[in-house]
Image (spheres, rainbow, N blue to C red):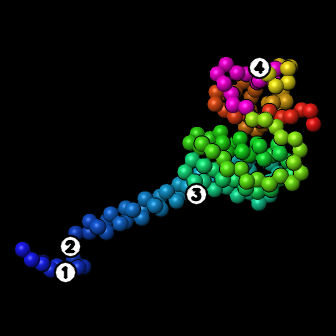
């Protein structure tokens, strides 16, 4: 029994390697987060929407988006684009709308839904599916390509 002295700068690098792994893991997470944010920016940019000072951040499964636009439609399209990504549970919408017109509704697609069925429910006319389709472009590229769980923008047509 007793104290044993060792030379501090010699020996196994086990602790150093664990510290390096922790740092690398932290760096990998940071790089992955930045890559995801970059993808989100690319998705929004590809939509050619009028939004100024766009800022997107990510906190686990929550996307935080801010900026300024002159249209509720643009704000809603950005929120839907970012929210309809696998692994994202919530979009924290901090987008400022300069001139807010009447708000659209959001609708979650159910099994067996079609745009014409949704149009009949909201407008009383299944042929008005085109308005829903147009309101969700470019997220939707074909009226028949919707899926259960997807959120859609249902525009207010009375305005």
Mark 2: give few (<14), some (14-19) or many (20+) Cα within 10 Å: few
**Residue that mark 1 sits on:** 7
Q: Position of residue 125 (x, y in %)?
A: 86, 19
Disc 3 designates what residue?
34
Determine the residue positioned at 12% across, 78% down.
Answer: 3
Q: Is residue 75 placed above or below 104 in the rendered structure?
A: below
Comes first in the chain, label 2 or label 3? 2
The mark found on residue 119 in the picture is: none
Q: Is residue 126 left or right of residue 80?
A: right
**Secondary structure type for disc 3:** helix
Residue 55 against residue 135 in the figure, above or below: below
The quarter of the rendered structure image containing the N terminus is bottom left
Residue at x-position 63% and y-position 45%: 90
Q: Residue at image x 20%, y 73%?
A: 11
- Quarter in which the C terminus is drawn: top right
Per the image, the residue denoted by label 4 is 117
Report helix, strand or loop for mark 2.
Answer: loop
| Marks 1 and 2 close (CB-CB < 8 Å) | yes
Mark linked to residue 11: 2
Task: Specify the segment rendered in magenta.
Answer: 107-120
Q: Earlier in the sequence, mark 4 or mark 1?
A: 1
């Amino acid at each position: 029994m007793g104290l044993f002295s060792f030379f501090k700068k010699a020996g196994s690098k086990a602790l150093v390697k664990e510290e390096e792994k922790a740092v690398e893991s932290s760096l990998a997470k940071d790089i992955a987060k930045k890559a995801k944010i970059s993808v989100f920016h690319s998705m929004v940019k590809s939509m050619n929407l009028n939004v100024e000072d766009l800022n997107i951040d990510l906190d686990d499964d929550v996307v935080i988006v801010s900026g300024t636009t002159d249209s509720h439609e643009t704000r809603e399209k950005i929120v839907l684009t970012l929210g309809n990504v696998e692994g994202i549970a919530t979009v924290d919408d901090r987008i400022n709308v300069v001139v807010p017109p009447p708000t659209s509704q959001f609708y979650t697609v159910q099994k067996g839904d079609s745009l014409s069925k949704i149009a009949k429910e909201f407008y009383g006319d299944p042929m008005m599916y085109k308005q829903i389709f147009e309101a969700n472009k470019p997220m939707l590229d074909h009226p028949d390509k919707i899926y259960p769980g997807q959120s859609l923008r249902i525009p207010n047509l009375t305005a």
